[in-house]
Amino acid sequence: MPGSATSGLSFQTPLIFEQGSPGRSGASLSADDLPEVDPKRAFGDMARQSPPQLPEVSEPEVVRHYVRLSQQNFAIDIGMYPLGSCTMKYNPKVNEWAARLTGFANLHPYMPDELVQGALELMWRLEQGLAEVCGMDRVSLHPAAGAQGELTGLMMIRAYHRAQGRDPKKVLIPDTAHGTNPASCALNGLQAVSFPVGEEGIVTTEALAPFVDDDVAAVMATNPNTVGLFESEMAAISELVHSKGGLVYGDGANLNALMGKARPGDLGIDVMQFNLHKTFTTPHGGGGPGCGPVGYKALLDPFAPVPVVEQRDGRFVLDYDSRPASVGRLRSFQGNFGMMVRAYAYLREMGAEGLKQATELAVLNANYLRVRLGEVWHVPYERICMHEVVISDRHLKDSHVTTMDVAKRLMDYGFHPPTVYFPLVVKGAMLIEPTETESLQTLDEFVDVMKTISDEANAEPDRAKSAPQVTRLRRLDETQAARKPVLRWTAPETPPEP
Ligand SMILES: *Cc1c(COP(=O)(O)O)cnc(C)c1O
């Protein structure tokens, strides 16, 4: 089986909670000399009644547990991870080195500005770099994810309207949008109004115009959109919305197709988020820290989150006071600083030319897959795409093999599945984003495997229907997992004898 990620390893080892034995420990600390505290007096009713039943394990047991978990998982460091809209690209290890430098990694967030000039300067320089890439005036580095960046941007838009004595409520969102867009509106007390994209898969001014009125706070646009197409009418759309007093929010998660080529700020976008954990190669997924900075035009500056890094008399300061109309603080301290170091290192390694080349390769790779996969698979939008391409399971209709089966079968062949059943506007969609970091050889392997799966689907549909077969766990009941997740280990009724 080509590139099978997990075959040959045995994983039948118990969970860490079932290992070890009472009294076993991986730490050897000298006895403390602190006075005994009566938990009842210190914590009252909150004092624990019985020991917490944590695993008591040795250092090798802990190490093996985590290494084993890492081997049971798929990762970009193992193989291609073409999860559309997520930009799972390879993260150069030099960025990890930079983030681990003692002078960055060991900073304390309460250190005074004078002692963290280097960190503040890095934040300042990152802000300048991101603003330049996107044509924005300033960038707030606070938000911890793309979705929180959306929330922040919409809060700034609302504050802007209110400062002018207006309170428009609607945000227009095309029906191809990422699910976080309407969610961010709802969180902000704004009403998400969905409108259809045109036949061509992009927003047209004709489709949008009937929805634009005085109650529109903003239009939220993703460019390239989630079917991987460039919104070529963006400048006209911005003009239309601006003419009615609304603002334009740009979902900048998909910057991998724009860097060095087109700047959202030049297309009329007033505020946008970046996903540093997508485009700027910091590790992504697994619920780890992200960073979703918000770039904005000067008209939104009074409402920016505080503190803002400012340069004064050649020094860097955290400014809390100059923006009384600020939307406030969105994140504890300064946000996920380690992500900022990684992104800054990446920007400096790549330079302007490198970013442009990354964009060109990302788009080339996606179009290569569009054409090669299109030899067998259904490609709903037969035109030049940007960094990702949508295909569908339409040609497998008679075999009853579906997109979900294909996704599961890909795991047997050592590939992470693409995004499935999204965008919603394409039935049985698979959204494939190869990114610039995959080689031609890997892309060809992926195409071969996709063709094999298609052949198999017709000849032996059960193969796909019963996939995955070589992963540690077989096909899971996704409904049960979503509806009744088991998120906690519970101790057996009788704890083991000491
Ligand atoms: C990933 C993504 C988001 C959300 O970003 P998170 O960091 O996961 O919150 C929003 N919009 C689009 C288009 C995305 O691809």
Image: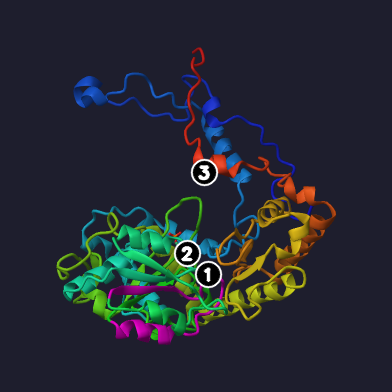
Badge 2 crowding class, 10 Å Cα cut-off, few under 14, some 14 to 19, many 20 or more, is many
Q: CA distance from mark 2 to mark 1?
A: 7 Å
Rendered location of residue 153, percent (x, y): 32, 68
> Which residue position is annotated with label 1?
226
Q: Is mark 2 within 8 Å of ligand 1?
A: yes
Q: Residue furthest right?
A: 459
Residue 437 included in the magenta stretch of the image: no
The answer to whether 221 appears left or right of 38 in the picture is: right
Q: Amino acid at mark 2?
A: His
Q: Secondary structure at mark 3?
A: helix
The one of 210 and 197 positioned closer to us in this rendering: 210
Q: Is mark 1 within 8 Å of ligand 1?
A: yes
Q: Amino acid at mark 3?
A: Ala
Badge 3 crowding class, 10 Å Cα cut-off, few under 14, some 14 to 19, many 20 or more, is few
Span of residues in magenta: 215-244
> Which residue position is annotated with label 2?
178
Residue 38 can be seen, yes or no: no
> Which residue position is annotated with label 3?
482
